[in-house]
Amino acid sequence: MGFDIIGCRPSSEVGKYFCNDVWNWRPLAHYCYEIAPDITKHCREWHTNDGDGLDADQALALAARLDAEVRAGCTEQHARRHESVREMMPTKPCWLCGGTGTRKPPSGRGIAEASDALDFDSNGEIVIRGNLIDKNCPIGPGDMKTGVKCNACRGEGFTRPFAAHYPFTVENVRNFVAFLRECGGFQIG
Ligand SMILES: [Zn+2]
């Protein structure tokens, strides 16, 4: 899943389109409403593809606020703090194999169901909806010991918590500022 931020009245190529995957977008959006809540409140839905956004004046105001933060070195500090928090997050028993390191080989349908069943709660923790195990798979639960090596943890039984996969970089903020200046307002789609 990703986010396409579309410029409403772009004045250049840069202002037409800004794209982030979900991992990069979430920390960027969080940073925006941390430093500019008075501006970001005009957009209610930062994490859905429902077309909410900011108008031209609000986008320019947000660009100015972010640019000031980057110039003052505050964004760099935020990025370092974000990275150290990510590094200190402890590993957890693998969410897919339950820490055993092995799992049943899912069929094609099982894999599709698995990816559809994954979601995140507000803390960035993995939430599994529905059933990950294909009922038509000929291998039963008793065969877990001899099942295939788990592809989520590479058989190690532990994975990094999902919250540790969200990067935050100054470069992404700079690119967003360049977009905001030229977009003439934007919609999140
Ligand atoms: Zn595993």
Image (tube, rainbow, N blue to C red):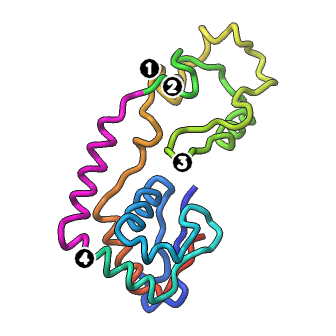
Q: Is mark 2 within 8 Å of ligand 1?
A: yes
Amino acid, disc 4: Ala
Marks 1 and 2, how far apart at CA: 8 Å
Q: CA distance from mark 4 to mark 3?
A: 29 Å
Q: Are marks 2 and 3 in contact (CB under 8 Å)?
A: no
Rendered image quadrant of residue 76: bottom left
Q: What residue lies at 56% left-to-right and 20% top-to-bottom?
A: 98
Residue behind mark 2: 94
Left or right side of 137 for 178 = left
Pointer 1 residue: 156
Give the magenta range. 69-91
Q: Characterize the local packing of mark 2: few (<14), some (14-19) or many (20 or more) Cα atoms within 10 angstroms.
A: many
Q: Which residue shows up at 46% across the image and 60% down it?
A: 25
Label 3: how many Cα within 10 Å (few below 14, some 14–19, many 20+): few
**Closer to the observer: label 4 or label 1?**
4
The amino acid type found where label 3 is placed reads: Ser
Q: Is residue 88 left or right of residue 139?
A: left
**Residue at the image position 41 percent from the left and 86 percent from the top:** 182
Q: Which sits in the foreground, 98 or 105? A: 98
Q: Report the residue marked by disc 4.
A: 68
In the image, residue 71 lies in the stretch drawn in magenta: yes
The x and y percentages for residue 175 are 35, 72
Q: Return the disc, 2 or 4, that comes first in the chain's sequence.
A: 4
Q: Is residue 77 magenta?
A: yes
- Distance from disc 3 to disc 1, alpha carbons, whole Å, reads 27 Å
